[in-house]
Amino acid sequence: MTARRIPALDWFRLAAVFLVVVNHTSPLGDLAPLADFWLARVLARLAVPFYLMVSGYFLAAKDWRGLIPFWRRSTLVYLIAAVLYLPLNLYAGVSPGEWLRDFLWQGSFYHLWYFPALLWGVLIARGLARLGMPLALGAASLLYLVGLGGDSYYGFAAQVPALRNLYAILFHWAGQTRNGLFYAPMFLLLGAALAKRTGRQSARLIAGGFAAALTGMSAEGLWLHRLQVQRHDSMYLLLPVCMVLLFQLLLACNSGRRRTARDLALLVYLLHPGCIVAVRGLARLTGIWALLVDNSLVHFCAVLATSFAAGWLLVRLRPMPPPRDSRAWREVDADALRHNVQVLQYAAGANCRLMAVVKADAYGHGARQCARILQRAGVRDFAVACLSEGIALRKAGIRGNLLVLGWTDPKLAPLLSRWRLTQAVISVEHGQALAAQGCRVRVHLALDTGMHRVGIPAGDTAALAGLCRLPGLQVKGVFSHLCVSDELTPESEAYTRRQADAFRTAVEMLHRAGIQPGDIHLLASYGIWNYPEYHFDLVRAGIALYGVQSDASATRRKLDLQPVLALKARIAHIEWLDTGETAGYGRAFTAPRPTLLAVAAIGYADGLPRHLPERGGRVLVRGVSCPMVGRMCMDQLLVDVTQAPQTAIGDVVTLIGCEGGASISAEEVAQRCGTITNELLSRLGTRLPLLRRTEK
Ligand SMILES: *Cc1c(COP(=O)(O)O)cnc(C)c1O
């Protein structure tokens, strides 16, 4: 079953906070006590573990690199909430010493126990995760079992004198075992473990498992309730099982985030005890206590409604960042990128890996975002142009081999090894200088087979073998680059074959000298299109990965690639010009007839070629192809939209991409300006936010 894709994790936060309110108000308390127990004391116990798991999931997804900001942010929220509830602490006569002790461990107000549990728990979970997931989960399970003995199973545990004494000591220091030591690490680590799982199971199967586990936990809860052994009712034996299945179910249909749902859930969580106090205050003032408080269902509804209303009000008041599609933006189609990976990997064949070239911010497609998509699609080899690009990708969590294709100052060798980057050796001197820095650097040797840009002369076997034997270098590969693989003239083809022969000979010579040169690679995108016979161990796909050709030249092989990027902007202004009126700098446009002129909020500072209007550039508005006119400005662009008279301010114009049945390709735009798509796309400015194209 393919589940419908929704922001399931963020939406479920709202369901969870609903359960928390249920837990704190017992809606069926006076109507059906047993049903209420099940609802508020069993089912509602799914809520907090879910929050902990989401935290663990997102922290581990980024290899815990966000831990410190997360900790700081959560502490700030806790502090604000603690201050908010301080008047109620004072009203209840809590002493400063007691308040501080509660603040640090079990929460300064009853619902705030979650924050110290989260803050301590996440530190413990992080520490345990260093042991590796199986050990960490084992340790967290032991802690959870201890917690269980002081919670739902206390009646059993207390029958053993040694355990009774142990718990007496524990409870002397803290009121409960549901805390940052015995409770939170378990769920944080379960979330973290799921972040590292790949492969998707059938949603239907998981749903069935969850239903079974929940039934089991309900039976467990009702049984313990009947035996009256529970000291508290937060922890059940089957709770972790339920949570794993529930979380997997949500992951199976999760797509994207919903900040509003996230913020609203947090606000309702923080505010609802205050709303309970407010509802009671109102009941006392108006004399409708019997209805508003004694009737548990009405009480629950009143608290729920006021909490969500207050939360919604605050959500509306929070400062919003500008929407990312308010002016001009790039859209990246993750499905197209994944499709291209498959096509290229298939074209490369079974014994050849695809190296994704993500230099120049992934040719303007956003290197971090693309590399993450590629990594999830199974790509293990990446290439960038320079050291800083490599480090940025490592910081973004990209693992696997990462080759720096361009020159890196040998003095920076320690950084290469610190970030586990592989450096291309572009000359004999470069290799020797890298080797002399005192840290073993992983390298690929670049061979010059006739391009005469960079590289060690392919015929210089002695020099190559010498580099391979330097103790300061770990040679992991050998490669070369073709300079006319995009041209199919007999002359260019002969040149390419000479390059390939020189490369092959050099590799054979190394083998004969007893050297294992590692990964052998020669082809970039046009090599893949035109020379499949030279695949070797890796192919380096740049422009092809993004689903476009550099120009309109013919290729020997046809690959079914899809363009990944679309470029869009909004209409900022519209006006009618009379015949003969002029517009823009230099009065370069004269209206040949009454003309509806629109201004699109994008210009050459966003990376568009300035000459595009005079070279016949066009945009799509409401499915109609309209010409760019006049001179392009730094941040704005004039368009004649007379053919699309319905055009309104705020409409989206497409500069690259499809709209309705029409489309404008990157190849077309590049060709108009006498350049190649590689240049056009890689120049798209960072002022253009990157949006994921949402699946339709
Ligand atoms: C940029 C680059 C590539 C990728 O080139 P495309 O033609 O975009 O596939 C491959 N190899 C080297 C050495 C490069 O510099």
Image (spheres, rainbow, N blue to C red):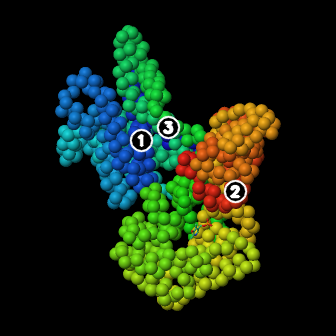
Residue shown at the point (37%, 60%) measured from the top left = 132
Q: Residue 419 appears in which quarter of the rendering?
A: bottom left
Q: Is residue 477 above or below residue 638?
A: below
Q: CA distance from mark 2 to mark 1?
A: 52 Å
Spot occupied by residue 245 in the image (x, y as percentages of width and height): 48, 47
Q: Is residue 505 above or below residue 244?
A: below
Spot occupied by residue 177 in the image (x, y as percentages of width and height): 28, 41
Dot 2 lies on which element?
Answer: loop
Frontmost residue, 173 versus 366: 366
Residue where numbered disc 2 is placed: 673
The reply to whether dot 2 and dot 3 touch (C-beta < 8 Å) is no
The reply, left or right, for residue 97 in relation to residue 491 is: left
Residue type indicated by callout 3: Pro
Q: On the rendering, which quadrant does ligand 1 occupy?
A: bottom right
Dot 3 lies on which element?
Answer: loop
Frontmost residue, 416 versus 436: 436
Does ligand 1 reach within 8 Å of label 2's beta carbon? no
- Tell me, for residue 321, which label it has, or none: 3
Residue type indicated by callout 2: Cys
| Residue 407 appears in the figure | yes
Q: Is residue 621 above or below residue 409?
A: above
First in residue order: circle 1 vs circle 3: 1
Residue where numbered disc 1 is placed: 51
